[in-house]
Image (spheres, rainbow, N blue to C red):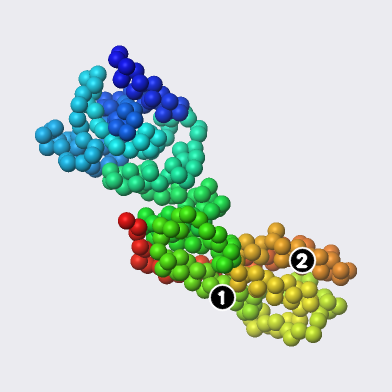
Amino acid sequence: MDDAKTSSAESTIACDSGVSFNDGDIIVRSTTAHVDFRVHRAFLAVASPFFRDMFSLPQSEQPSRTASVGDMEDGLPIVPFEEDPETLRTLLQLCYPRYMFLDDKPIFPTIERVLPVLIAAKKYAMDGVEREIRAVLISPQFVDPDPLRVFALAVKHGMYEEAKICARHTLLTPVLAKRYIPELENITGGAYHHLQEYHIRCGVVAAGVVQDLRWITNETSVWFDCSGCRGGSPPVVIAGDRRKWVAKWWTEFMLEAGNLLRECPSGVTVGVDSHVVQMAMEKASTCVACRSRALREIKEFCAIFAAQVDKIVDGVEFGYLALNVAA
């Protein structure tokens, strides 16, 4: 074996990171680093009509595209790709059935690895692979720690549905507290404006959950029963237009919850582990009658409260319909 082939074989082993592409009936070559992958053309043909058509045509009629059947090596045709070895390896892995790989490493350890593979999948018309990659992009692995970054990337690449999902996740932080990230340079000011506008509209409807309490059906909670904690506030109206007097600490809890929901319109904001709930528990514990029931009942209430907030916010449309895709 000559030096070039030796270098190619060594690069393939290093690139594969435990996943073997040493068997197949064609050679897929990354021309940027002369790294070869031996793969079965049947899997590429199933994944992409582009490759299905390519393999069915004689050499003289190959489509004019970067990837086309060219030279031979070891009796196998070579298909050159301009993608880097890591991108190509991941793309090929997604074309194969998962059970054929014993590697338990994540296919996409970082978000930087996702986008080149997504672009390649679009380029080679691998629709099924593209759908899988788009799902990965909005998975908790990437969206939970940085929804604004994923939002910007989704907008840049024209993925409206993914952008909507990311916009929903950005509601966990105040609209004015969103930090600068380099990816914002790749979207228009209009896109970012629509995100802020969406956040404000969600804040208004989320805060409205505190103002209209007719979603509350349980009238036996301790904050309704404890006459000793009632303040000077007027009664509230719950389901069935029933008027109920409430404990002062619960009124304060709901007012604070409304303020927080305007800033962070998400059910998580009023979840049982939230700061506002802990404050309510501290106030309720000063009342002998409330303290024995408040903890359990507020947990039950917050589950319903959070679900109501999310239900209302889910009805708010993210209105940026014309995504401006960066050139």
Give the image quarter of residue 203: bottom right
Residue 252 in the image, given as x and y percentages of width and height: 74, 75
Of the numbered discs 1 and 2, the one sitting upstream in the chain is 1
Using residue 1 as the reference point, say whether residue 69 is left or right of it: left
**Gap in angstroms between the C-alphas marked 1 and 2:** 23 Å
With respect to residue 161, does 29 lie above or below?
above
Does residue 304 show up? Answer: no
The residue where tag 2 is placed is 279
User: Which residue type does callout 1 highlight?
Assistant: Val
User: Which residue type does callout 2 highlight?
Assistant: Met
Give the image quarter of residue 84: top left
With respect to residue 309, does 140 lie above or below?
above
The residue where tag 1 is placed is 204
Residue 114 in the image, given as x and y percentages of width and height: 43, 44
Q: Quadrant of the C terminus?
A: bottom left
Nearer to me, 7 or 24: 7
SS of the residue at dot 2? Answer: helix
Using residue 107 as the reference point, say whether residue 205 is left or right of it: right
Residue 315 in the image, given as x and y percentages of width and height: 49, 70
* Outermost top residue: 1
Residue at the spot 81% in from the left edge and 69% down from the top edge: 283
Residue 323 in the image, given as x and y percentages of width and height: 36, 63
